[in-house]
Amino acid sequence: MPRRLAATRERLRGWLHARGVSEWDVETVLIATGEACANAIEHGYRFAPEGITTLRAELRGDRLEIEVRDQGGWRPADGDESGDRGRGRLIMARVMDEATIVGTPEGTYVRLVKRLTPGG
């Protein structure tokens, strides 16, 4: 599983660099996207490790939109974010301009939006 995540991060990094995104924004986006993908792998497919997680990225001017989807089981937040777990949502919300997480019995959809630094 970690190899899949590393490969996904590197593909996204290359895609962002090819579009002239600044290194600061690339690293920020990779942090949030890495959290979303790791959550999908760890939580969405905890009972089905062969599950598929999809990532879609779209750049519209200075607005980057990322979607991460899984078809695994949804686990509602337990309300206890004081331990070492459960900080992914907070991280995504802090480093991105928008972070929306929608969980259903059919899976989880994460939408991340970042307004990129002018001038790349």
Image: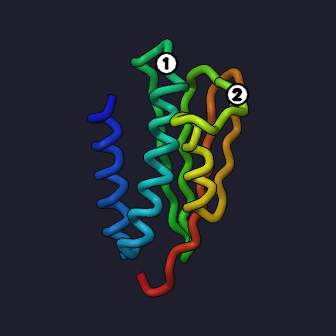
Q: Identify the element where label 1 is drawn.
A: loop
Picture residue at 68% right of the left edge, 33% below the top: 80
Mark 2, other Cα within 10 Å: few <14 / some 14–19 / many ≥20:
few
Q: Position of residue 75 (x, y in %)?
A: 65, 24
Q: Position of residue 18 (x, y in %)?
A: 32, 69
Q: Mark 2 vs mark 1: give the one in front.
A: 2
Q: Residue furthest top?
A: 47
Q: Which mark is residue 62?
A: none
Q: Identify the element where label 2 is drawn.
A: loop
Q: Earlier in the sequence, mark 2 or mark 1?
A: 1
Question: Does 7 sit left or right of 119 as displayed?
Answer: left
Q: Residue furthest bottom?
A: 119
In the foreground, 68 or 82: 82
Q: Is 72 situated above or below 77?
A: above
What amino acid type is highlighted by mark number 1?
A: Arg
Q: Which residue is mark 2?
A: 78
Q: Position of residue 113 (x, y in %)?
A: 60, 61
Q: Which residue is mark 1?
A: 46
Picture residue at 61% right of the left edge, 49% below the top: 90
In the foreground, 13 or 87: 87
Picture residue at 44% right of the left edge, 69% below the top: 25
Q: Quadrant of residue 114?
A: bottom right
Q: Is 7 situated above or below 66?
A: above
Q: Position of residue 118 (x, y in %)?
A: 50, 84
What amino acid type is highlighted by mark number 2?
A: Asp
Measure how far apart labels 2 and 1 are at the Cα level.
17 Å
Q: Quadrant of the C terminus?
A: bottom left
